[in-house]
Amino acid sequence: MSKHALQPAGNFPKAGFWKRLAAITYDFMLCIALIMVVTLIYQQGILRLIYGSEALQAMADSQMLDIDPVLSTILFFSVFAFFAKFWTHGGQTLGMQVWGIRVQNADGSAIDIWQALLRFLIAIFAWLPAGLGFWWMLFDKNKRTWSDIYSGSDVVQLPKNIHKK
């Protein structure tokens, strides 16, 4: 699979801590909205069609819907798809676009789907120990988080005067 160069091209500095945190916060809110919509469609659409309204209400009342591995799997893949699409096609999620940062390979090309999966999985584990994998960038001489290190990618700051066409 050939790599495609991202635009604008250039040798950009690594993104700073606060901009990355702001983009993460923005994307987190978008992911919460995505989770809410997917859950609504699953529970009120698909499950209602399968079981009917009364049976679904009885299941909810008896807390049978509290732990649903099918829903958990759907949500996991939905959130991954959100990040993978943006990271592999333009290098920027919506939060990253707002804050002018981008994920890319060292040569300026877009990351591939495997790198996106690795970034996503490592990010989950990086946030579990009180965000240590993210805070790591404050001590790394190259400003890399665990996700950056293990996926072989960089998060860079795009200049304000360069606009995508």
Image: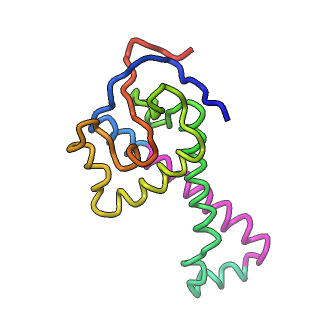
Residue at 60%, 44% in the rendered image = 113
Q: Percent position (x, y) of residue 97?
A: 46, 30
Q: Percent position (x, y) of residue 62?
A: 58, 87
Residue at 61%, 57% in the rendered image = 77
Residue 127 lies, with reference to residue 98, above or below; the image says: below
Residue 129 lies, with reference to residue 66, above or below; the image says: above
Residue at 72%, 71% in the rendered image = 47
Dividing the image into 4 quarters, which one contains the N terminus? Answer: top right
Q: Is residue 91 left or right of residue 4?
A: left
In terms of secondary structure, what is the magenta stretch mainly?
A: helix
141 or 29, nearer to the observer:
141
Q: Percent position (x, y) of residue 142?
A: 28, 36
Residue at 26%, 49% in the rendered image = 135
In magenta, the rendered stretch is 27-53
Occupied quadrant, residue 74: bottom right
Dividing the image into 4 quarters, which one contains the C terminus? Answer: top right
